[in-house]
Image (cartoon, rainbow, N blue to C red):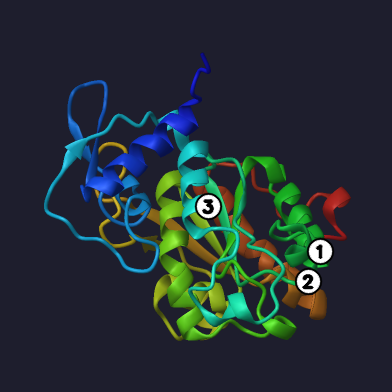
Amino acid sequence: MMIESREEALRSRLDFYRELGIGPLYRRDISGRSVSEAGYGSVADATSDQSEPQDCAAATDLTVPVEDREALLQVIRDDIGPHCTRCKLGRLGRTQIVFGVGDPHAELMFIGEGPGADEDAQGLPFVGRAGQLLNNMIGAMGLKREQVYIANIVKCRPPGNRTPERDECDTCSPFLMRQIGVIQPKIIVALGATAAKNLLGMNDSMASMRGHLYDFSPPRLLTDAGELFNCKLAVTYHPAFLLRDPKQKKEAWKDLQIVMRYLDLPVQQRAPKEEAKGV
């Protein structure tokens, strides 16, 4: 007799509820309180149709331990599917979906614009030259890449690495919000203007968006304790921009210091020498 893995059991249960048309779902913690999972980042979204959001009045209890974040992220990845064509990026030459990578329990999450050629080839975010610089930036903060979570506004490479268009960002946004809901970081760093404008719903310049810690609270997203999810969000330059204009690396380091202070990480006035080439 085969023993079903936790991930398989979770997916089977979600499929069962989807077939019944039941949702939104709730999680019951060990104290017996019902924890709503409705909205972005929730198990309820994992049960909805891929093309249209589901808003049902019915509800049921579903035990989903917090440590199953990897399984919940896999559910989101499976919901997207390997050949997503919800927006035109899926028909414009992308090789594969670039979902996200890192620690599902990370306190710090980086969100960029979209995959480039190297990312499209490998299926991982930030693995090209810009990714190497991001790794150095993370290292200068005293962290390792494996300790953070990295994703993008859109999960498919725009042709010619152009800026993602509004409808493409809007189509991918629910899946990104679900990722944020699973990871529940303490702070998000938006890399570049495209990421910042989409996450904050603002159309300001980088100069005006940088240097602040914003309250970021996606609609209908609840924490494991059943409270409205809220984290901080900081804005800095995209590593690809820093490669084109290295003089701005000092400004990016100032932005990262703001994040470090919020996370109670040791802050140095200058980046460590071993990371000097990166930051």
* Badge 2 amino acid: Ala
Name the residue: 31% across, 40% down. 16
Q: Which mark is residue 117?
A: 2
Q: Which mark is residue 19?
A: none
Residue at which label 1 appears: 128
* Badge 1 amino acid: Gly
* Badge 3 amino acid: Arg
Q: Position of residue 137 (x, y in %)?
A: 73, 56
140 sits to left or right of 220: right
Q: Position of residue 80 (x, y in %)?
A: 50, 59
What quarter of the picture does the C terminus occupy? Answer: bottom right
Q: Secondary structure at mark 1?
A: loop
Mark in front: 3 vs 2: 3
Q: Position of residue 234 (x, y in %)?
A: 51, 63
| Of 270 and 134, the residue lying toward us | 134
Kindly indicate whether the residue at mark 2 contacts the one at mark 1 (C-beta within 8 angstroms).
Answer: yes
Farthest top residue in view:
1
**Corner quadrant of residue 28:** top left
250 sits to left or right of 8: right
Q: Is residue 60 visible?
A: yes
Kindly indicate whether the residue at mark 3 contacts the one at mark 1 (C-beta within 8 angstroms).
Answer: no
As measured in the structure, the alpha-carbon distance from the residue carrying label 1 to the one carrying label 2 is 8 Å
Q: Is residue 142 visible?
A: no
As measured in the structure, the alpha-carbon distance from the residue carrying label 1 to the one carrying label 3 is 22 Å
